[in-house]
């Protein structure tokens, strides 16, 4: 059964026609995680909101949904951070500057930064979940005067799996945002002087007013339940919590049903949800 909002399934004439994009820069974070900067044809801006995604077409291979990681405050080329986990993502990992891809979108509901302006913000990111949240974090930093207190919590499996390490260092040194980080473990061949433990060990240490703070969360599915329990212990109202649930998206237009959660489709009703919207959805696993 599909959502009752039939308008969202109205397919525009050129809905499935990708526009050409050119890879202008790449950067390896880990063996599997790589950043791609993409310029659209004729220098057009993508026109996205933080938290939205695009459909990325690799010629002769296929198409996948990928979250946009750059902030809309950054003009010109946009950025995707892609983990090599399948045919399409492995194929683009073999591509580089000058290669062409297809882009459709942006799609989905983003974080809608205008509704958070004037609010204190707590960002909680686990693993590659930092990629979509980075867009909103940098949006708020680029519009610092429009937001109250900012706090970011980031957890990675191990030090070598941290993303955007130069940017993380900048966040550590800022005096207008509190930044906490942790790793689950530190192998003996890696250096780490920070906290060791799962991401939830950081949450009791954040200094927030639960009534005035909006919390944005993105990470692996197993993380959500435990983060939500910690936020409940801090007395954060459910209405103040927003979750990015990017799991199982496939077609990006609510047609294939891969991402269906009861009457909701992650790709068209989300991927960003206010927690009460999905609190009682068994498939949401939150």
Image (spheres, rainbow, N blue to C red):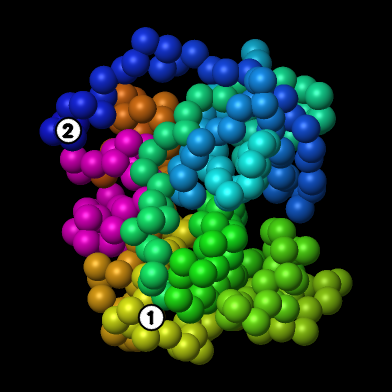
Crowding at dot 1, Cα within 10 Å, few <14 / some 14-19 / many 20+, comes out as some
> x and y percent of residue 243 in the render?
37, 59
* Residue nearer the viewer, 158 or 72: 72
Work out which quarter of the rendered image holds the C terminus and state it: bottom left
> x and y percent of residue 76 in the render?
66, 36
Q: Is residue 42 left or right of residue 239?
A: right
Residue visible at 49% across and 49% down? 50
Q: Is residue 174 left or right of residue 250?
A: right
Task: State the extent of the magenta-drawn residues as a range.
Answer: 262-286
* Residue nearer the viewer, 14 or 147: 147
Is residue 235 visible from the viewing direction of this image?
yes
User: Circle 1 is placed at which residue position?
Assistant: 230
User: Circle 2 is placed at which residue position?
Assistant: 5
Crowding at dot 2, Cα within 10 Å, few <14 / some 14-19 / many 20+, comes out as few
| Marks 1, 2: nearer the viewer | 2
User: What secondary structure is marked by label 1?
Assistant: helix
Residue visible at 58% across and 65% down? 141
Is residue 84 visible from the viewing direction of this image?
no
- Give the mark nearer the N terminus: 1 vs 2: 2
Q: Is residue 37 magenta?
A: no
Work out which quarter of the rendered image holds the N terminus and state it: top left
In which quarter of the view is residue 241 placed?
A: bottom left
Q: Is residue 35 above or below residue 128?
A: above
Residue sticking out furthest to the front? 145
What numbered label is drawn on residue 240?
Answer: none
Q: Is residue 2 left or right of residue 131?
A: left
> x and y percent of residue 162 in the render?
70, 63
In which quarter of the view is residue 46 placed?
A: top right
Q: Is residue 43 left or right of residue 191?
A: left
């Amino acid at each position: 059964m599909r959502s009752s909002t039939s308008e969202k399934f109205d397919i525009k004439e050129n809905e499935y026609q990708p526009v050409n994009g050119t890879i202008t820069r790449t950067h390896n974070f880990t063996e599997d995680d790589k950043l791609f900067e993409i310029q659209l044809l004729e220098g057009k801006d993508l026109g996205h909101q933080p938290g939205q995604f695009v459909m990325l077409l690799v010629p002769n291979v296929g198409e996948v949904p990928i979250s946009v990681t750059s902030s809309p405050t950054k003009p010109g080329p946009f950025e995707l951070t892609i983990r090599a986990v399948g045919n399409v993502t492995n194929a683009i990992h073999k591509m580089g500057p000058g290669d062409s891809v297809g882009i459709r979108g942006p799609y989905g509901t983003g974080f809608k930064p205008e509704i958070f302006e004037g609010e204190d913000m707590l960002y909680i990111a686990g693993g590659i979940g930092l990629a979509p949240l980075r867009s909103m974090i940098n949006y708020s930093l680029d519009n610092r005067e429009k937001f109250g207190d900012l706090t970011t919590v980031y957890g990675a499996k191990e030090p070598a799996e941290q993303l955007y390490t130069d940017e993380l260092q900048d966040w550590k040194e800022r005096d207008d945002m509190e930044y906490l980080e942790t790793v689950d473990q530190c192998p003996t061949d890696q250096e780490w002087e920070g906290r060791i433990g799962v991401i939830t060990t950081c949450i009791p240490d954040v200094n927030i007013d639960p009534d005035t703070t909006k919390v944005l969360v993105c990470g692996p599915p197993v993380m959500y339940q435990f983060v939500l329990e910690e936020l409940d212990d801090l007395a954060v109202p459910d209405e103040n919590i927003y979750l990015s649930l990017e799991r199982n998206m496939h077609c990006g237009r609510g047609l294939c049903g891969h991402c269906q959660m009861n009457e909701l489709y992650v790709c068209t009703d989300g991927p960003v949800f206010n927690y009460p919207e999905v609190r009682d959805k068994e498939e949401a696993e939150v």
